[in-house]
């Protein structure tokens, strides 16, 4: 079975997804849409798209497209998702799905009422490293989890990435980076039941540095930090009462981790397919082919849980 894709946007994420599709035999990229015809034409030429549009709705009206990948600015995700669903397309949308809980609930309800697939593109959850860690945690390889530390502090220049500092475009460290530690900690420790956040807000009004102290189900604690103002190791540590699992760098796109148990360390090397985005494409295909409208790894209820935390953090920073 071949799955025919269309991409909204021609930015960095769109190019990464197009590159990943070349590693998935049953994925066919047939169309792209941009705000300008020139940008769409250049993207189509680079990736061999049959159709290039200068209007999103023109792409969505193409009856040959099965799935739409949305990589537009955060602030217009909701409108793009609802329009894609209106045209009967399955949707994979970059994180965050929307910029508010209310908008997410609307998109969720629409997808379910139309019987269409919708998933937030949190690619990290599908990497082989994360799948292996999930298995080890389920097997109690480090005993009962006690604490998780996850940090994604990566410098962003407001002149080079002005959209990240523009509240009207859904900017801010919470929308850009916060979803990673907030989502991945909940994958392993369950729902966050209580939390407090310390934030530093920039002159544009978006949060630029955040540290969250959180309590999860089963009395698990986590420390989650993210922000734009410094460059730090993007690491994650899961501490159990019998051992520790550590991703020492780039936990958002991991290819290795270490398991420490009884004084011994075992290292695992699990490289992703291509640039890593192929794994979420494979998840989308598997779900649709088997009649599942949501991913069991990242169901919409999980995205909603994360969105509620993101909303609270953004509110606290104002």
Image (spheres, rainbow, N blue to C red):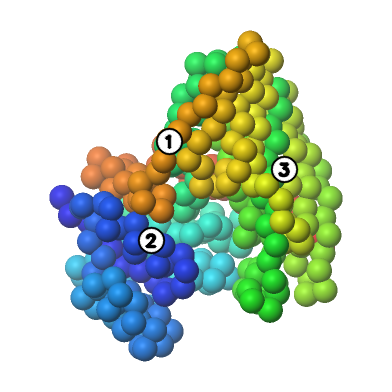
Tell me the CA gap for discs 2 and 1. 20 Å
Image marks 2 and 1: residues in contact by CB distance under 8 Å: no
Query: Which residue is labeled 2 in the image?
Result: 17
Query: Which residue is labeled 1 in the image?
Result: 270
Closest to the observer, 110 or 165:
165
Q: Earlier in the sequence, mark 2 or mark 1?
A: 2
Instruction: Categorize mark 3 by other alpha carbons within 10 Å: few (<14), some (14-19), many (20+).
Output: many
Residue 40 in picture, x, y percent from top left: 35, 81
- The residue that appears at 27% across and 58% down in the rendered structure is 22
Instruction: Categorize mark 1 by other alpha carbons within 10 Å: few (<14), some (14-19), many (20+).
Output: some
Q: Is residue 267 left or right of residue 248?
A: left
Helix, strand or loop under label 3: strand
Helix, strand or loop under label 2: helix
Q: Does the image show residue 268? A: yes
Which tag is nearer the camera, tag 2 or tag 1?
A: 1
Query: What number is the disc on residue 224?
Result: 3
Image marks 1 and 3: residues in contact by CB distance under 8 Å: no
Helix, strand or loop under label 1: loop
Closest to the observer, 169 or 255:
255
Q: Is residue 240 left or right of residue 131?
A: right
Tell me the CA gap for discs 1 and 3. 25 Å
């Amino acid at each position: 079975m071949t799955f025919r894709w269309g991409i909204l946007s021609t930015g960095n994420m769109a190019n990464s997804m197009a590159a990943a599709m070349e590693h998935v035999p049953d994925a066919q990229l047939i169309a792209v849409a941009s705000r300008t015809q020139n940008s769409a034409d250049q993207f189509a030429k680079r990736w061999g798209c049959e159709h290039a549009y200068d209007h999103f709705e023109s792409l969505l009206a193409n009856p040959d497209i099965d799935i739409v990948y949305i990589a537009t600015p955060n602030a217009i995700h909701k409108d793009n998702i609802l329009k894609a669903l209106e045209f009967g397309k399955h949707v994979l949308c970059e994180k965050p799905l929307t910029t508010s809980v209310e908008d997410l609930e609307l998109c969720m309800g629409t997808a379910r009422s139309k019987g269409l697939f919708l998933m937030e593109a949190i690619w990290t959850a599908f990497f082989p490293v994360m799948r292996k860690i999930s298995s080890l945690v389920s097997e109690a390889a480090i005993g009962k989890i006690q604490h998780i530390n996850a940090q994604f502090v990566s410098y962003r220049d407001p002149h080079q990435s002005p959209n990240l500092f523009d509240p009207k475009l859904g900017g801010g460290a919470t929308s850009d980076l916060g979803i990673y530690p907030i989502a991945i900690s909940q994958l392993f420790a369950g729902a966050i039941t209580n939390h407090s956040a310390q934030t530093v807000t920039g002159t544009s009004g978006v949060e630029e540095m955040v540290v969250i102290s959180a309590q999860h189900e089963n009395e698990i604690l986590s420390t989650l930090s993210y922000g734009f103002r410094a460059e730090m190791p993007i690491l994650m540590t899961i501490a159990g009462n019998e051992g520790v699992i550590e991703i020492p760098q780039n936990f958002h796109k991991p290819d290795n981790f270490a398991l420490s148990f009884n004084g011994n360390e075992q290292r695992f090397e699990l490289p992703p397919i291509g640039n890593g985005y192929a794994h979420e494409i494979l998840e989308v295909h598997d779900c649709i082919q088997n009649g599942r409208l949501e991913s069991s790894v990242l169901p919409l209820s999980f995205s909603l849980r994360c969105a509620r935390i993101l909303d609270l953090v953004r509110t606290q920073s104002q």
